[in-house]
Image: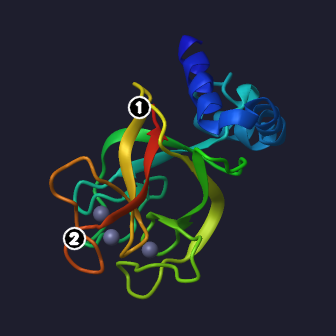
Amino acid sequence: MGFERDRRTFLTRALGATTGLVAVTAATTVTGPAEAHAADTGVKGARGAKGAVGQRNWRFCPKCFVMFYYGYPDNGHCTAGDAHGMAGYDFDIPHDVLENSNAQANWRFCTRCYSMFFFGYPSGGWCPVGGSHSAAGYNFVLPHDIVETPNAQAYWRFCSNCFALFFWGYQEKGRCPAGGGHNAAGFNFVIPHY
Ligand SMILES: [Zn+2]
Ligand SMILES: [Zn+2]
Ligand SMILES: [Zn+2]
């Protein structure tokens, strides 16, 4: 229970000044899906009733350094070849909540490579499969420029070349489908995780 409370505190902080309103709205509107999710996975039954707004199973790929969705039997397409690898935290990424000065919307799942990419520009970036990323599913809202905690990792960045979310915390910058390493721009995202 302590963990859940900490997490809510974190999300509340992430959501910023209009928190009261946002938190209430989120708790109300996502009750159905959140309960279904808890039932599906058989874990943390209390979570759905307490404003859970995230999707789990987002992971770091140690081959290309992007954030990708690990919830399907195959693991998409990696710029380094074959499917993405998986390492590190089980990220739990907020979606379909209001954007604010510390949380950016329009981050989406790519149905072709399974990465998280920014869909807020006319172009869909550069997908390792070829062409642009293809958006589907939730509208993710990524917390940024807030304090890192034991349950939220900083140094996730937007790549201005391929539009994917990648981990910038290593000296190496992974593998970008546009060539070379990813190129960080914009916010310093701080992503909640288990
Ligand atoms: Zn990869
Ligand atoms: Zn893609
Ligand atoms: Zn890139």
Mark 2 vs ligand 1: CB below 8 Å = yes
Q: How many marks?
A: 2
Tell me the number on the disc at residue 148.
1
In this rendered view, identify the residue nearer to me: 115 or 9.
9
Q: Quadrant of ligand 1?
A: bottom left
For the point 22% across and 60% down, which residue is it? 173
State which quarter of the image contains the C terminus: top left
Eye-nearest disc, 2 or 1? 1
Q: Amino acid at mark 2?
A: Ala
Q: How is the image coloured?
A: rainbow
Q: Name which of mark 2 and mark 1 comes first in the sequence.
A: 2
- Callout 1: helix, strand or loop? loop
Residue underneath mark 2: 80
Residue type at mark 1?
Answer: Glu
| Residue 52: percent from left, percent from top | 67, 34
User: Percent from the top left, x then y, of residue 124?
Assistant: 51, 79
Residue furthest left as drawn: 171
Res 1 quadrant in image: top right
Query: Which residue appears at 64% of the width and 63% of the height?
Result: 137
Percent of width and height locating residue 86: 30, 51
Q: Residue furthest bottom?
A: 131
- Mark 1 Cα-neighbour bin, 10 Å: few <14, some 14–19, many ≥20: some
